[in-house]
Image: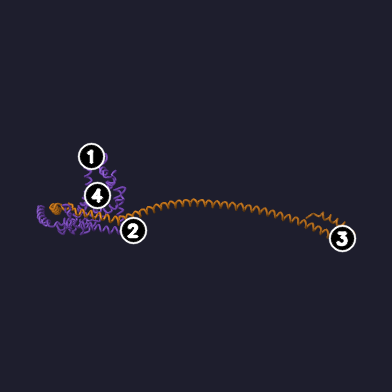
Chain colours: A purple, B orange
Amino acid sequence: MQLLTVFLQEHNKLDTLSKMREEDNWIMHHILDKHVISIPPVNLGGFDLNLSISMKILMLIIAAVLMLILFTYAAASNKKRKHPTGLGNFLEMLMVFVRDDIVKPSMGHGYEKFLPFFFTLFFFILFVNLLSLIPGMSTGTSSISVTAGLAIITFIMTQIHGIKNNGFFGYFKGLIPPGVPVFVLPIMIIIEFIALLTKPFALAVRLFANMTAGHIVIYTLIGLIFLLGYAVIPVSIGFALFIYLLEILVGVLQTYIFTMLSALFIGMAIHQDH
Amino acid sequence: MSLAYIFLKFHSILLLIQADTHEKGDPLLSVEPGLLIWTIIIFILLLLILKKYAWGPLLKSLNDREQGIKDSVEKAEYLKQEAEKILEKNKILLAKADEDARKIIAEGKELAEKMRNDLMNKTNEDTARLLSQAKSEIEREKIAALNTLKDEIANLAVQAAGKIIDENLDTAKQKKIIDNFIGKIPQN
């Protein structure tokens, strides 16, 4: 009986709240993008391309500028002395980690040529992910468009270098595992073609979902305070802090996974024989 | 009771989110081409700039340092081996020198012993020789002295007898008698 009354009360509240929400869904408001600098849409053959600088683009630019400053500084400082110290040493340690623990084991021989690409990929995602944890900042990677952009770059790199190393026909022939009977060939071609497209799709969705979920949970936990009253502040803040710390781990982990899988895909495209 | 309450609250929040996203046709999952293109542009620009100004120099200094460390370690290893070789050689040389020194000392001792023995023998011999020489000299001198003494005594006796008997006997005859007498006297 009691439960029922509570349930009815809730429904009443819910009705009023959803009316409020239609005007202002504050969680979505925080997760989604908003334009900072509006640029009139460019029309490309009947297709409107809106190149306005939004919050997320601004975040990407901030991350990029931060990277430029830090890494050029590190390069200059490491060049000066024989043994790097401070920031240069730290960034170099991360670079060595990317090189020895991500790219080298995933790609095998011939990985040196791709190091600049993977360094940029790794640090760009890392910077964007970690910048998103600063209050007031937006999460660049919690937009499927941004992660799709990164995945498309990996996809294009994979195809270009696969074709470059194995020849155009060699590359596509190499996608199909050797020793497949002729009658399975049509199915295999379709499956392999889908697999080709699934890889970047999975990359994009994985990063996007992981970076979005944590932030939504944090916003929700904070929102609980306003829904349930101030009594839940300790619980809410405690959980939000826990998720926040978890987000640091997730941000680093997803960067690692994205870079490692990219290296794996490109390595597989180059060395098709194994 | 309170758990059910919290559950209902959560449920309402989820409903709200769901209701909102359904209305606008999932703005969370729709790809915005502008954002996508911006991402690619920023990434490529970042890659190009960093490749030239950061990754290149950083990788170069990193590789140089790693090569340097590798070389240093190899060199140290080589030098250590060399040093060990030299130490071994030195040990052998030292042992040899030790043995040589002992041999030389032993030889010297032997030589000294021999020389001492020789010298002692020679000294003994010399002493004996000198002693016998001295003895024979003394003997000879004694004989000569005795002879002189005999002559002197004989002369003195003759003179004395001459004075006593005066002219009764001639000198030659008397001398003969006395010589005979003296000759009968034992040598000592």
Which residue in the protein does label 3 denote? B162
Q: Is residue A250 left or right of residue B1?
A: right
Q: Are discs 2 and 3 both within one chain?
A: no
Q: Position of residue B165 (x, y in %)?
A: 88, 60
The answer to whether one can see residue B5 in this image is: no
* Amino acid type of the residue tagged 2 in the rendering: Lys
Q: Earlier in the sequence, mark 1 or mark 2?
A: 2
Q: Which mark is residue A79?
A: 2
Of the residues shown, which amino acid type is indicated by label 1? Leu
Circles 4 and 2 in contact, beta carbons < 8 Å: no
List x then y, in percent, for residue A3: 11, 52
Task: Tell whether B167 sits left or right of A236.
Answer: right
Label 4, label 1: how far apart the Cα atoms are: 25 Å
Residue under mark 2: which chain is it in?
A
Amino acid type shown at disc 4: Ile
Q: Which residue is mark 4?
A: A156
Q: Residues within 10 Å of mark 4 (few under 14, many from 20)?
A: some
Counting every numbered tag in the picture gives 4
- For the residues bearing labels 2 and 3, Cβ distance under 8 angstroms: no
Q: Nearer the viewer, residue A256 or A273?
A: A273
Q: Secondary structure at mark 1?
A: helix
Residue for badge 1: A185
User: Tag 3: Cα neighbours inside 10 Å, few (<14), some, or many (≥20)?
Assistant: some
Tag nearer the camera, 3 or 4: 4
Q: Secondary structure at mark 4?
A: helix
Give x and y (percent) for residue B89. Answer: 48, 51
Mark 2 nearby-residue class (10 Å; few <14, some 14–19, many ≥20):
some
